[in-house]
Structures are given as structure tokens and as C-alpha cells.
Amino acid sequence: MITRIEIDGFKSFKDFSMDFTPFTVIAGTNASGKSNLFDALHLLKKLTEFDLRTAFSGERGEPIELFTQYKDNEYTNKMSLNVEMLIDKHIIDNWGVEADIKYTRLRYELTLERKKNERNLDELYVIHEELKIIKKANDTWAKNFLPKDVETKYNWIPKVVGGKSDPYIRTIEDKNNRSFKIRQDGKAGGKATPGNAVAQTILSSINSVDFPHAFAAKEEIRKWKFLQLSPDVLRQPSKYLAKSSLDYDGANLASTLFRIKQDDEFNLKNISRKLNNLLPNMVEINVIDDKPNQQYLVKAKSEEGEEYTSRVLSEGTLRLLVLCVLLYDDDFNGLLCFEEPENGIHPSRIHTMIDLLNDLSINFDEGDSPLRQVMINTHSPTLVGSVLKLENNLKNSIWFSRLISKKIEYKNNKFMTKVTKMLPVVPNQQKVLNLFNTSEEEKKLTLTEVKNYLENFQVDEYL
């Protein structure tokens, strides 16, 4: 899971930082930068899988528009994306080789530069990349949010005696030369890569447990899932050769359910029970092997005994079904980013959906829980009000997003530009607000803005 992000030079972010809990809600009006945070995470995921050109293609906006704009046709030429993570201690690569890592708290830093190549065309380069251990003495997040019980805490951060503390990936600057070094780790020896024209991250080249900590960091980022569910896609059957995991738009729902049924039919029954608790009229979910058409088909049974295929289920039912599937899918872990989950959900069901998303995220007091994290953005006052009612404030957090004016100095010129600022809003727990290093002025301003944002919602009992 991601515990902290620092962004500079990406879209509306300038010297931005934010800490995360297992269930993090980002609220705010439209055009306040909520989606830009998801875009930054999505870009970082692609940068650890593909070369720079491929990673930047297909993102929202032209590649140059991903850099912070100061005025018309004036963009910054550098972008930094740094993340701190808590990762699984057991890893397995695509060849089935398994390994355990010593350190589960890692920090990954990446800085890119946009400059002209020898043909006077814009090109992207990696100018800084580092992967290092977050030392226990400096790990304020772990001190604040992991259980105080030593035995439970060691489930997430193993006790280590001795060992090197050098970065697993580091950038070496030598006069006019730059190189990237992968330190010896596990079975593989260290190696250096010339870096003056690097157009791909070092992390993207790590594909096996030969470099276990670097591979574990890459796998953590690679598992980030971004949901933008499409009801038309969710309603479709899955062909036999379709992937057996949910895609970002909900594709492969039927084949995912079929795989879950084959692995453990009891989990399919759990999905039915959970959906029935949310939607009492739905008493059973099943998946049929439609052999004549070589496809898998989702079927639902109502309390009246009538059966329906997924083709006629409502958008709200399908969205709740997806979350139930993820909850009982033993193959799913990592970060789930869900934009505006309230879409298609009746307001009376939003509180139920929030309970489900909360259940989907990890509870660190349960030592054998899968390492799952949920991050959503919303502009729904009803949804924010439902989150305010949740217990366990060390697990859940709400951040309020807004655009503020900031003076920027660039190339000896000063510009006034709009940048995204996010501040934590945690009800009834001043201690938790202090964990996020929020000033008294910011706390008062945020609470006032949230009250105005929630309009007629009665929040005084929560704030």
C-alpha cells in the first residue's frame, strides 16, 4: 500500500505531499485536482512498466500538458513523483520463483526532465531514480498508524538485525556523467547503467526476484488498480480466453467469478450473501459455463425465484457486485482507486457502499489480512457524510481538495498559478489531525470549507 506521495511539476501539483490511511477519501468540487492525484498514480504505474514515451501516451491530455503549466505555452521542464510504501514481505515472479524480503517499508523517488534532443524535438529523460529503505527511526507513518502490539506490528514490518542500508537503486552524478546503480540484493550482483540518455526507469527493467526488494516495489506499484466502471461492459459475458481478473472498466466480471467459483465455491456463496445484505431482493449470484457459445455468463436470482442475466442488472447492482467480488477474491490485493463510486448508486445505498469499501481495506489489527487499500474521490456530500460516521479514525481519513493561488518562480520569472492543496479532515480526533502535521489555521479553514461544501448535511455532531 502507498503511505505517502510527494509530487512536483505534474499538472496542478507544486511541492505537494499527502499521507494515506488504508481507506482514504478525497472530497471536493469539480476541477479541484481530485482526479489529478489519480492521474499521477496512474502515470507512475506506467513508468514502472514501460518506456517514458509509452507511459506518457494515452494519459488524459497531451504529454506536455502533464507538466505544470505556468502561463500560455509555458510549462515546467521537470517532474518528480516520490512514494513511500508498505509492501508484502512474500513475493513471487512470473517464473514461479518465490522470495521473502527483509524490509517492507520502501521509498521510491523518480524525477523526469523534458528537454530538446539533437533534432531539437522534445524528449523525456530520467534524471533521478532511487529506491531505499525507510529506516525505523524515521518512520513516523508506521509509528502513528500500525498497531502498537509488537507481535502484530512485526507481521507488517519484520524485525531485522544487521544488513546494508544502501539504496537498492541510486543515481550517481560524476561531473557531466550520470549513471544508475542497482545494488547487489539477493542472488544477483549489482550493475550500473549509463544514464545521460535513459528513456526508461530502472525499476521497469526488474522482472524477477533476483533483485527482491526492487522487484517487490515494482510489483506493489504494478498492482495498483484504477476503476472506471462501465455498465455496458459489466453486463457482457466473458469469452473462454478472457482474463480471469477484473479490468479497470469492469471487463472480465464473469470469468473472474468463474475462477473464484473454481478455486473456492464458498467464496461465491459469500459474494451472494454480501450482495443480499446490501440488496435484499438479490438472493443468489452464480456464473454459468455457456458451452455452446464458449463463454461464462453471470446470473442473479431474486427473492421471488426469478433468474436474470447480467445483461438486465442495473448499474447500481453491478457496481455493488464488483465490490463484493473484490472483497472475496483471494487473488486481489494492493491499492484500489475508485473515481466517484457514488455514480449509479441510489443515495439511500451510499452508506451501505461505504461500509463495503471500508471492509475492503485492511485492518492492521488483524495480522493475517490481505494488504488492501482503497482510495476514492468524490464530490458527493452524502458520501462524505457517510464516511464521517465510520469508526476507527486511524484506518479512515478524509482529505478536502481545492485550488489555491501560488506564486511560482521559473526561469527568473514569477508567475501566479493555481495549484492543488489537500488538507485532512478527521472528526472528533485532534490527535489524528496532528499526525498529518496540519497547522491550526489550516484545520480551521478546512473544517469551515467542508461544512460549507456539505451544505445542508448535518455534520456538526461529527466535526
Image (cartoon, rainbow, N blue to C red):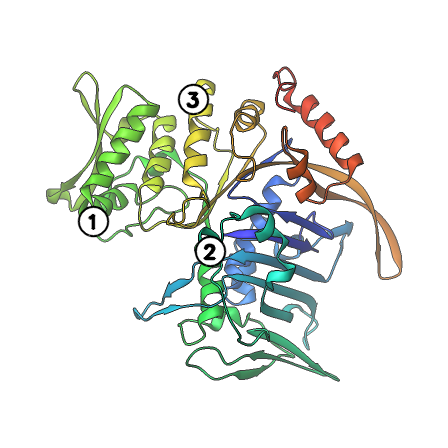
Give the image location of residue 162, x and y in percent: 53, 75
Q: Which mark is residue 349?
A: 3
Viewer-closest of 375 and 194: 375
Q: Nearer the viewer, mark 1 or mark 2?
A: 2
Give the side of residue 227 with respect to residue 37, left or right. left
Q: Amino acid at mark 3?
A: Arg
Q: Residue at x 58, y 24 (%)?
A: 381
| Secondary structure at numbered mark 2 | loop
Viewer-closest of 89 and 255: 89
Image quarter of the C terminus: top right
Q: Amino acid at mark 1?
A: Asp
Give the side of residue 118 with respect to residue 105, left or right. right
Q: Which mark is residue 263?
A: 1
| Separation of marks 3 and 2 at Cα, in angstroms | 34 Å
Asked whether residue 49 is in view, the answer is no
Relative to 385, does residue 203 appear above or below in the rendering?
Answer: below
Q: Amino acid at mark 2?
A: Trp
Q: Residue at x 46, y 30 (%)?
A: 354
| Secondary structure at numbered mark 3 | helix
Q: Nearer the viewer, mark 3 or mark 2?
A: 2
Q: Residues within 10 Å of mark 2 (few under 14, many from 20)?
A: many
Q: Residues within 10 Å of mark 1 (few under 14, many from 20)?
A: few
Tags 1 and 2 touching, CB below 8 Å: no
Q: Which mark is residue 98?
A: none
Give the image location of residue 20, x and y in percent: 58, 46
Residue with the mark numbered 2: 156
